[in-house]
Image (spheres, rainbow, N blue to C red):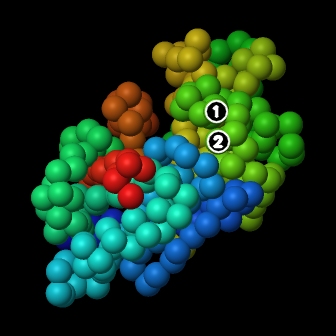
Amino acid sequence: MTTFNSNYFLELADQNLAAAILHRNSHAPHGSVAKKDQSIMFNIGIDNMDGHLNGVLCLGQTVSGTGTGPEPEALFNEAKTFFGKDKRGFVIWVRDHADFELETYLKGRGYKPLREPGSTGMMIQKPIEMPVSGDGIEIKKVMGSQEAADYAAVVRDAFDKSEAVAREMFGSLGSVVAENVGAWVVYGNHRPKAGAMMVASGEAAGIYYVGTVADERGKGLGALATVAATNGGFELGAKCVVLQASIAGEKVYRRLGYEAITHYRWYLIPAEDL
């Protein structure tokens, strides 16, 4: 990719991440958002140190005195006020391609990223051929309440979410079924084994909460869900599909054809710091 195209796709990736977060929050029974031109703060309504649920994401350059985004100290103080009313810990996202001064500020306050270099931002620009699946395996797009409940059950198991957190994440069928949103569940002998969701925004689509239940991992089921969700994004006209990969997931996504374009790091701000 040229530098121009790299910046273009990175902006699409950031905007899609924000769109997915805002969509999820809008369906959370107790969710709230503080949205500005170049940043969003989002509270899912229950304690959970997951950057997709309770956090701060900048969309412009976080540069003191210049740039298009918020000044780091002002952003940090606004976030403390936003989450302080609930005494709720939260995550500040740092984008490798845009948040140098924000990261410098956080490190200066003694915070460290959850892991380095962070979650790998990845992208693909064409549909993926569906891998051959084994006997008894079926992939279904979520269309109704039963499939939605099955997908929520996969996410609870795969991401160690409580039922209370899952209720906020999937507060209504619209959280996973909308004109620009879809989810897919991989069933094995009629039991939900894996799943993934897709959110389309502008010229990009993003893949989120790809997971496999603990006792079914290592069988390629997560890859099946990823392919279904990825191709679902392209069917809606996306020019690219993006995701943020876990350590284990990155190997799978590379085999499917995804390429690394950046890293995202999480800085955890505990409730006791508010």
Q: Give the image location of residue 247, x and y in percent.
A: 34, 32
Write the residue at 79% across / 53% down.
172
Query: The residue under label 1 is which amino acid type?
Result: Ser
Specify whether residue 202 is in view. Answer: yes
Quadrant into which the C terminus falls: bottom left
Q: Is residue 124 left or right of residue 171?
A: left
The image shows residue 168, relative to residue 18, as above or below, that is above
Q: CA distance from mark 1 to mark 2?
A: 5 Å
Residue matched to label 2:
165
| Mark 2 residue crowding within 10 angstroms, few (<14) / some (14–19) / many (20+) | some
Q: Give the image location of residue 90, x and y in percent.
A: 43, 53
Quadrant into which the N terminus falls: bottom left
The image shows residue 56, relative to residue 67, as above or below, that is above
The image shows residue 84, relative to residue 34, as above or below, that is above
Q: How many marks?
A: 2
Write the residue at 72% across / 18% down.
188
**In the image shown, does 58 or 19 lie closer to the viewer?**
58
Task: Say what secondary structure mark 2 lies in.
Answer: helix
Residue matched to label 1:
162
Write the residue at 73% across / 44% down.
167
Q: Is residue 21 left or right of residue 267?
A: right
The image shows residue 166, relative to residue 263, as above or below, that is above
**In the image shown, does 53 or 262 lie closer to the viewer?**
53
Q: Quadrant of residue 221?
A: top right
**In the image shown, does 247 or 241 lie closer to the viewer?**
247
- Is label 1 in contact with label 2 (beta carbons under 8 Å)? yes
Q: Is residue 91 left or right of residue 85?
A: left
**In the image shown, does 246 or 49 lie closer to the viewer?**
49
Write the residue at 86% across / 45% down.
144
Query: The residue under label 2 is which amino acid type?
Result: Val
